[in-house]
Image (cartoon, rainbow, N blue to C red):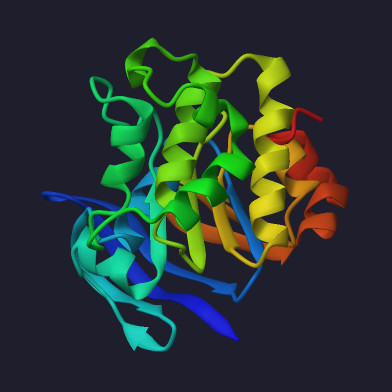
């Protein structure tokens, strides 16, 4: 079943149009990545799905319903959540306070949900009272993802989750994302480590200059010599 469908999406910021007729889909439980050069519009696309850009045409549908331009809170209520690039946490709040913020569409953060997050990210239970800005980059990213999972999304959207992380932390983070997907949550991810993420994803899209150029199975993209030379460092 198609969970997310983007059709002929045109969007940008103010008078600047960055996306020029984007088509994209994510099926229930699927793991999909978007690759492309810096400045291609990947982050703008992620923002646009979540209603954070200026809409200039086209549609975004989720679970068969048009959600084009809906605000962030309503997107979360519909069953999706988004971790944008670069420290999408509340830096002056503790780990626990950040996680409670993830339950803002509900009356409270249940013990069951909290324990589920701690089972995925044990470091967060160890650092419950720690102020978020004093944590390492990898721990902050785990906190951001953990907070997003509080709403139990069917689709988790991630923009460059390994950005700024030490190399030895990247595989650990990707393994956590794999586990989230294996448990049934669909993943849509933009990631600078394109080869690594294609090794984990089901399908990939190639985005350049605000337009989708390719859509193929991840294995096919990895085997494509042109893609390897241009986007996977040979």
Q: Quadrant of the N terminus?
A: bottom right
Query: Which residue is farthest right?
Result: 223
In this picture, residue 76 sits left or right of residue 192: left
In this rendering, the answer to whether 52 lies above or below 99 is: below
Residue 105 location, x and y as percent? 24, 61
Residue under the image location 70 percent in, 36 percent down:
230
Q: Relative to the observer, which residue lies in front, 48 or 169?
A: 169
Residue under the image location 49 percent in, 14 percent down:
136
Task: Tell me which corner region of the image, top left, top right, bottom left or bottom right, holds residue 129.
Answer: top left
In this picture, residue 10 sits left or right of residue 229: left
Residue under the image location 67 percent in, 42 percent down:
176
Total marks in image: 0
In this rendering, the answer to whether 191 lies above or below 72 is: above
Q: Relative to the observer, which residue lies in front, 75 or 116?
A: 116
Whether residue 105 can be seen here: yes
In this picture, residue 13 sits left or right of residue 146: left
Whether residue 38 can be seen here: no
Residue 81 location, x and y as percent? 39, 57
Task: Tell me which corner region of the image, top left, top right, bottom left or bottom right, holds residue 135.
Answer: top left
Residue 109 location, x and y as percent? 33, 53
Q: Quadrant of the C terminus?
A: top right
């Amino acid at each position: 079943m198609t969970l997310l469908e983007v059709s002929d999406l045109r969007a940008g910021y103010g008078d600047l149009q960055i996306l020029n007729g984007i088509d994209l889909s994510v099926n229930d439980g699927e793991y999909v990545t978007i690759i492309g050069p810096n400045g291609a519009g990947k982050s703008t696309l992620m923002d646009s799905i979540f209603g954070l850009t200026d809409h200039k045409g086209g549609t975004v549908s989720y679970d068969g319903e048009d959600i084009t331009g809906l605000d962030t809170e309503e997107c979360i209520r519909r069953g999706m959540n988004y971790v944008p690039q670069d420290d999408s946490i509340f830096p002056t709040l503790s780990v626990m306070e950040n996680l409670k913020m993830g339950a803002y569409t509900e009356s409270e953060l249940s013990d069951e949900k909290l324990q589920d997050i701690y089972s995925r990210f044990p470091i967060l239970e160890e650092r419950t009272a720690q102020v978020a800005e004093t944590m390492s980059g990898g721990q902050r990213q785990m906190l951001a993802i953990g907070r997003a999972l509080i709403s139990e999304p069917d689709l988790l959207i991630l923009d460059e989750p390994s950005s700024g992380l030490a190399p030895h932390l990247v595989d650990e983070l990707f393994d956590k994302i794999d586990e989230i997907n294996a448990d049934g949550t669909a993943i849509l991810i933009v990631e600078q480590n394109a080869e690594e993420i294609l090794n984990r994803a089901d399908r990939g899209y190639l985005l350049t200059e605000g337009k989708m150029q390719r859509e193929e199975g991840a294995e096919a993209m990895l085997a494509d010599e042109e893609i390897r030379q241009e986007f996977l460092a040979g």
